[in-house]
């Protein structure tokens, strides 16, 4: 990613308020990165931590 793309990506991530929307974006973004890597003959980026985890609802306490 270019520095400009990275800044835009980070800003978009910070703007999510629901896990579902964030997760959908994460999957879409990963597919884009896989396609870009393939075009350049590079290995696809490995999955990293789920940057949407902070939006998950905590399990109810018993």
Image (cartoon, grey):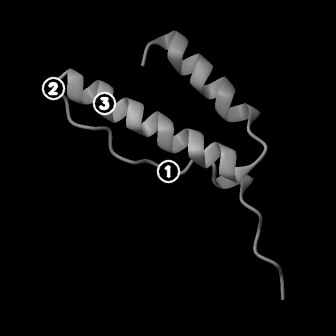
> Horizontal placement of 43 versus 57: left or right?
left
For mark 1, give the secondary structure: loop
Query: At 52% across and 16% down in the image, what residue appears?
Result: 5
Say which label, 1 or 3, has the lower sequence index: 3
Say which label, 3 or 2, has the lower sequence index: 3
Measure the C-alpha gap from mark 3 to mark 2.
Answer: 10 Å
Query: At 20% across and 21% down in the image, what residue appears?
Result: 40
Which residue has dot 2 on it?
Answer: 41
Tag in front: 1 or 3: 3
Measure the C-alpha gap from mark 2 to mark 1.
Answer: 24 Å
Q: Which mark is residue 49?
A: 1
Residue 39 % position (x, y):
22, 23
Which residue has dot 3 on it?
Answer: 35
* Residue 13, above or below 62: above
Quarter of the view holding residue 59: bottom right
Number of marks in the image?
Answer: 3
Residue 61 or residue 5, whichever sits in front: 5
* Residue 4, above or below 56: above
Query: At 64% across and 44% down in the image, what residue appears?
Result: 22
> Horizontal placement of 6 versus 35: left or right?
right
């Amino acid at each position: 990613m270019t520095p400009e793309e990275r800044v835009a990506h980070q800003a978009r991530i910070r703007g999510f308020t629901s896990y579902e929307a964030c997760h959908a974006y994460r999957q879409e973004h990963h597919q884009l990165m896989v396609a870009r890597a393939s075009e350049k003959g590079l290995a696809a980026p490995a999955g990293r931590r789920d940057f949407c985890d902070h939006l998950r609802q905590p399990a109810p306490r018993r």
